[in-house]
Amino acid sequence: METERQDTLESPSPPAPGRFRGAQLLFWVPACLVHGGAVAWAAVLVERFRAPVLLFSLLVGVVLGTTLVGAIRLFQVGNRPTILLGTVLAALVSVVGQHYLSHRTACRQARDHANTFQLAKSAFGDQLLAETPVPPASFIEFLPWRAARGFQFLGHHVRGAIVWLIWLVDGLLVLSATLTLVVPALRRPYCDRCRSWYATTRCGPMDLPTARHVAALVETDLPDEATAARYRFFTCSAGCTPAGFELLWQSRGGDQSSAKVWLSHRRRNRIIETLDRG
């Protein structure tokens, strides 16, 4: 259970979502494209050693999503549509990039095999096996060529439409795993004044008498069956917008509940004094 209410003493408003800024878009989208390409390159390297079917796609999405969340916090990009646009493009580049790098690898291997074949042919004549098929030089032509040749999937050789379906599922898994990490991170408040994401600045446990006093200050009823309580302050980096406060408690049976409020400076100071006394 979670409730969210405003501070009724002075009625501070929650921070507004981050506004759109063209400079952030011009920075974030190219950065996501480069980052998606880097993840694709790393995925192709790891794939040479071990890449469980479908599970590897989820792993790529987890890595991409985790690093994107870190970049959001590091560069303090706050406009959510801008972030989501860059995230989708990064996932797309990471998926397509893996196929493109596989194409370049196949072309390079084909050239090496062709050179080896010509050297062997000049030395031993025509008593040789057939020459290795050469993939198309065009990436657009390579995908149908690769799908027609097929590959091993769960002990079966698949080709054609099934290969395209596997590639589609692979891309959706990467995208879904990435969004699963990025979207929840965007629920954290963002201060558009100092352009920073809210972060926890103070937290810890409370004894029950102090918790009941704090609950009264934030107009929340702490149930009698509560057995433990904690608190958390979260603010922007400059403290220029209302601070957030969350009261969490655990009841008998292990049920956990919380109440979240936005605080005026006066109410925040009263809560801090209560915590310090407790």
Image (cartoon, rainbow, N blue to C red):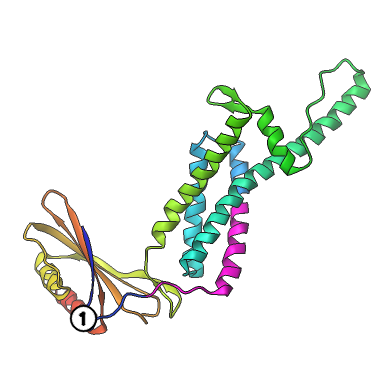
Quadrant of the drawing holding the C terminus: bottom left
Quadrant of the drawing holding the N terminus: bottom left
In the foreground, 76 or 92: 92
Whether residue 62 is visible to the viewer of this picture, yes or no, is: no
User: Left of 4 or right of it: where is 115?
Assistant: right
Vertically, is 249 above or below 120?
below
User: Left of 74 or right of it: where is 275?
Assistant: left
- Specify start and end residues of the magenta stretch as a single range: 16-37
The secondary element bearing badge 1 is classed as helix
For label 1, the residue is 267
Q: Counting other residues with Cα less than 10 Å from the Cα at mark 1, is it few (<14), some (14-19), or many (20 or more)?
A: some
- Residue located at (46% from left, 48% from top): 177
Q: Position of residue 50 (x, y in %)?
A: 56, 35
Q: Position of residue 106 (x, y in %)?
A: 73, 36
Q: Is residue 68 magenta?
A: no
Q: Could you say which quadrant of the image residue 138 lies in?
A: top right
Q: Is residue 24 magenta?
A: yes
In the foreground, 42 or 140: 140
| Residue lying farthest to the front in this orientation | 161
Q: Could you say which quadrant of the image residue 227 lies in?
A: bottom left
Whether residue 155 is visible to the viewer of this picture, yes or no, is: yes
Vertically, is 248 above or below 274?
above
- Residue located at (56% from left, 22% from top): 156
* Dominant secondary structure, magenta: helix
Vertically, is 73 above or below 177?
below
- Residue located at (63% from left, 52% from top): 37
Vertically, is 44 above or below 229?
above
User: Left of 72 or right of it: where is 32?
Assistant: right
